[in-house]
Amino acid sequence: MKPMFYRCLNTTSVEKDHSATMGWVLFSAGLLGNLLALGLLARSGLGSCPLRSPRQAPSVFYVLVCGLTITDLLGKCLLSPVVLAAYAQNRSLWGLVSTPGSSLCQAFAFSMSFFGLASTLQLLAMALECWLSLGHPFFYQQYITLRRGALVAPVVSAFSLAFCALPFAGFGKFVQYCPGTWCFIQMAHEERSPSVLGYSVLYASILALLVLAIVLCNLSAMRNLYAMHRRLRQRRRSVPRDRVELSAGEGEASPPPLEELDHLLLLALMTVLFTMCSLPLTYRAYHGAFEAVPKENGASEDVADLRALRFISVISIVDPWIFIIFRTSVFRMSFHKIFIRPLRYRNCHSNSCQTNMESSL
């Protein structure tokens, strides 16, 4: 018996009252961001971690971010044009092919699940790289090499290919979702099939665990950066002013005060965005598996599924802007001018006031 929860299961035309505007916005933002990211990588390279200076020689993080950018760009170029073509011709994925059927829908759903899982795995690799480089530098220097970093992309691709191909072997199922412009893993079933629902829950659980690991790595990196910032402030307070001026005159390289604040804010932004974008899909998978969905609520369920899809698609758009473009000198200069410089001036002013009070005493 076919799953009646999906009104657009076998339709060959796109439902009315749906616009391609959001599809164009997501595609344009993702394409522009990834192309700019690749251009910046090709021009200047990137250091070992986004929290380190962009002037350093390309390292493990450079390899990881290149793999992530290429993965996101391929996903956008392979999937978004199909969605836009469906809107332009007013045909669903079932109706776009010459002989209506599920071949294009199956390929689209497989590609979408593959790129979603592969990108998240690569994000985890990047988060682990930053966590190790900041919190365990000796282990990082000994075991994290360029050769091992280059193995991340093929290993991630092999695992994602094998896992996302399971529906072709009978574990899980791909279906067409309303308005007929996208296909994905089936997340609800009328007969509560263990294989269908088990695969959707497993896929969503893996994504949730990966995002949780990313969040923990970022929180640990933020903790390390905060500790570095506190040590720097204590060191500057303990060193006499004449020694600081002498060291500066001799040209010693010392990080500017409060420079770690932009790193903390960057990691906090990454953590919040990744969590917000992944939670809707996880919720929809568990909702379809463990809660009885009334058939009369099919339209609202379709809207919720489409919203969860768009949230998960935002991750591939956010990736290049956060990891690369936000780390360029222009953005850093503007960020420091707006946020860091006022804080630095306030701290310097308070320190000078405290020094004057102590001298007067």
Image (cartoon, rainbow, N blue to C red):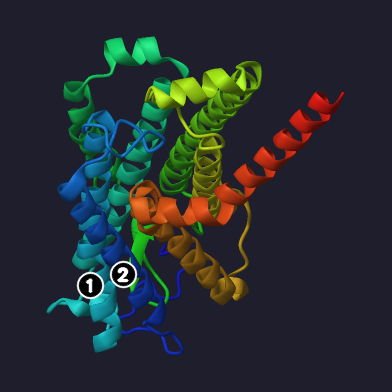
Residue 1 visible in the picture: yes
**Which residue is outermost to the front?**
360
The dot on residue 333 is none
Left or right: 212 in relation to 183: right
Q: Quadrant of the C terminus?
A: top right
Residue 285 visible in the picture: no
Task: Residue 40 in the image: state x and y as whole percent.
Answer: 23, 52
The residue indicated by pointer 1 is 81
The residue drawn where x is 39% and y is 59% is 313
The residue drawn where x is 54% and y is 30% is 216
Q: Indicate the amino acid at tag 2.
A: Phe
Viewer-nearest residue: 224 or 169:
224
Q: Quadrant of the N terminus?
A: bottom left
Viewer-nearest residue: 319 or 76:
319
Left or right: 356 in relation to 73: right
**Which residue is outermost to the left?**
98
Viewer-nearest residue: 208 or 238:
238
The residue drawn where x is 61% and y is 73% is 297
Question: Crowding near pointer 2: few (<14 within 10 Å), some, many (20+)?
Answer: many
Q: Earlier in the sequence, mark 2 or mark 1?
A: 2
Q: Are marks 2 and 1 in contact (CB under 8 Å)?
A: yes
Task: Residue 116 in the image: state x and y as whole percent.
Answer: 35, 50
Left or right: 221 in relation to 347: left
The residue indicated by pointer 2 is 27
Rendering quarter of residue 321: bottom left
Which callout, 2 or 1, points to the residue nearer the camera? 2
**SS for dot 2:** helix
Q: Is residue 71 above or below residue 213?
A: below
Left or right: 314 in relation to 111: right
**SS for dot 1:** helix
Q: Indicate the amino acid at tag 1.
A: Pro
Q: Is residue 88 above or below residue 148?
A: below
